[in-house]
Image (tube, rainbow, N blue to C red):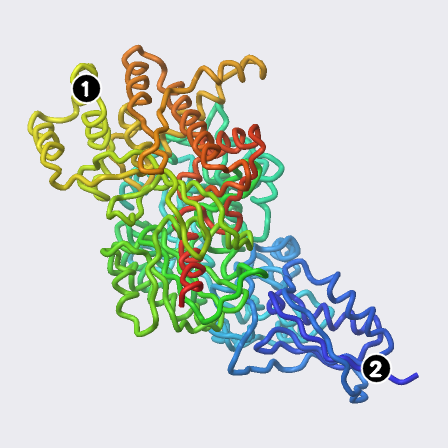
Amino acid sequence: MKIQAKAIYFNGIVQGVGFRPFVFKLAEELGINGWVNNSSHGVTIHAEGNKLDLFYDRLLNEAPPLAQIVTARFVETEPKSYKTFEIVESEAEQDADVLISPDVATCRDCLKDMADPMSRYCAYPFTNCTNCGPRYSIIRDVPYDRVQTTMSEFPMCNSCAADYRNPRDRRFHAQPVACKNCGPKLQLSDAFGHPLPGIGLDQLAQGGIIAVKGLGGFHLVCDARNTEAVRRLRERKERGSKPFAVMTRSVAKACNEVNISAKEEELLQCPAAPIVVLERKLTLAEPLPGNIAPGIQTLGIIMPYTPVHHRLFEGPCDFLVMTSANLSGRPLIYTNEEAFEALQGIADYFLMHNRDIYHPCDDSVVQVIGHEIVFFRRARGYVPLPILMSQIQIKTPLLGVGGELKNAFCLALGQRAFVSQYIGDMEGYENLQRFHQELESFQRVVNIAPSAIAYDKHPNYQLTRFALEQPWPKYAVQHHHAHLVSVLGEWDRTEPTLGVICDGTGYGEDHCIWGFEFLYGNSSGYERKGHLEYLGLPGGDAGAKQPLRIAYSYLKTLFDSAEWEKTSSFWSAFSIHERQILDRQLETGIQVFQTSSAGRLFDAVSALLGVCTKVTYEGQAAIELESLGADFLRQESLEDSEYRSRNKQLLYSYEVRAENGVLILGVRQLFEELVRDVLLGVSREEIAYRFHQTIAQAIVDIALQLGAGCGPLVLSGGVFQNKLLTEAVLENCQAQGMKVLRSRSLPPGDGGLAFGQLLIANEVL
């Protein structure tokens, strides 16, 4: 029988995930000769033998767990009479088209090696194999080979080189492979740089704060049960009330502190190892200190995902605060030099290693809302996975720069879009520099050099100015239009759709601050169908840090004199002078900006309930208000039927009126009834719960009036990271038979904005 030959091409995440060893072993099993290599276009195979169809089918169906095949094809070719099957050297080509794997949490086999006293990997804090370890954070360029990573500084010892070349070894062609004889080294030092023995277990147990270099940057770490250590860390880092994430020894230990569903446990233990926001248990004998997450009843839990993390749990601590090492408002620290300089006075000790991080990457943050994963922050473990499109074609290499807050940019060409890791807020110089740095290096990883740019219409954003300085064609995109289209793009939909976009701020077409919008459209355009009524915001975006001033302005605008007099007790925190200034502002309109923002509405209610009157981190007032409302729901012990009956009576009143063909959500009655409840002494928990239920009902009411029952309703914007609100909206939509589309691989907040910007610009440029 004549020997057949095929040239086989795979593209996707097929490098750095054990794909070539898998091909090699399968070829050996089936008696296939030829070769496999990494190329700048993925994996290329030349196969000769009599079982090529079976070989191809099994390659598709039995690929390694971390591999993601995007395209696969083969062509018949001439046999070359190979006698064996080999892995050959990678080919570098000018036009690379290969997907790089995200960083992957340490696998169980590597943990066994670390625990084996007979293994040279015993206790080695950089143990990895083809199934785990650093990927994106260390790669400089494609193809993914050791020489293209920061591991190029560490020549393999004879033993590691033998493992690397042995196709039957788990470390066969694992690019970061190393052991204690040839790999990176870990060193503990004090604040003066003096080397210390160990890895800091004693120091943690004694209340010390350690700066620990991880996969994507530095963390600040302390014993989570040590209230004083947590207090010092919060104070030194200027953290305000922003919650800390907590790393735990095991899921079993976490279950002592938080409620964990099957889906949440799966997330905790998945290779991406994100921070998972979980509900704290109501009654605990010895709960973790309240100053870990002040004012809220959730806790961000993360599992150990590097060998260094696992070693830190060799000590007595079951829970460690694990927070990004950056000063307030500044980017993540990831180099040894910067850490030692910038963290003086914050960290008592430094646990550093000498493997460079090329792409700094924060921990990803997720929560299960309505039985689906919602991203708060998308970074390590998920970037640089692409968004794949079949109905949408990006015609020219495009860059969407994203927004000013929670920034992530997006590069796209053809039917792939790559959203960067979370960069941060663009207010400071250092953050803008990090944006430039990552934009330059990300282009090499995804092989897209933009020739056109999309940006937010806000004229004063840093990235708007950046976009306008570029020599390429450029397109300004309305903020909430981008939110709508981002979700449609994730679902690969192009038809016009109704969406409700709720967030804190976005520059409107009428120069007002939008943020509670009903938009109908797609990437070709949109129509504003409805919105929250405009209310005066003293100080504009800067005024968002003063929720009590927002509440004062809203009630002064909405209430008549008799109703206003009843609110005098709410303003005791203001001096007479402050009230005079606010009154003067509202009378003259000086520095008072009209807003329809959902975020500011939540802020005002939070302030009226005395929950949060001054914010120390973005979204704090709304987050604490949600937590209060969730407490009421958790404490309810009524039967389901009675609960549903009572639920209908818990709504506040609101008005929906038409103005010039646009539906307006009026909230005067809502505030009147809410203030009445506060004065009557109704519990803050019940008022907060009522408010969330009312807004959820109003959203669905207006959507139905706008015809949402005829098609899906898009939910987008950072407010839909609010679990209590979102699940109430979903429940109401289900009751009305309405389908809902939400973000599924990007954050609903501004972290997904760049993708929508880019899709809209694609229609024009």
Give the amino acid at mark 2.
Answer: Gln
**Mark linked to residue 434:** none
Which one is in front in this view, the residue at disc 2 or the one at disc 1? 1
Q: Earlier in the sequence, mark 2 or mark 1?
A: 2
CB under 8 Å between callouts 2 and 1? no
Q: Is residue 315 visible?
A: no
Image quarter of the C terminus: bottom left
Residue 102 is left or right of residue 325, and the answer is right
Give the amino acid at mark 1.
Answer: Asp
**Separation of disc 2 and disc 1 at Cα?**
87 Å
**Mark linked to residue 560:** 1
| Classed neighbour count for the residue bearing mark 2: other residues with Cα under 10 Å, few (<14), some (14–19), many (≥20) | some
Q: Position of residue 677 (x, y in %)?
A: 32, 14
Residue indicated by mark 2 = 4
Q: Is residue 240 above or below residue 280?
A: below
Q: Position of residue 662 (x, y in %)?
A: 35, 38
Residue 294 is left or right of residue 15, and the answer is left
| Classed neighbour count for the residue bearing mark 1: other residues with Cα under 10 Å, few (<14), some (14–19), many (≥20) | few
In the image, 520 versus 610, the foreground residue is: 520
Residue in view at x 52 percent, y 14 percent: 645
Q: Is residue 48 above or below residue 185?
A: below
Q: Position of residue 434 (x, y in %)?
A: 33, 63
In the image, 762 versus 166, the foreground residue is: 762
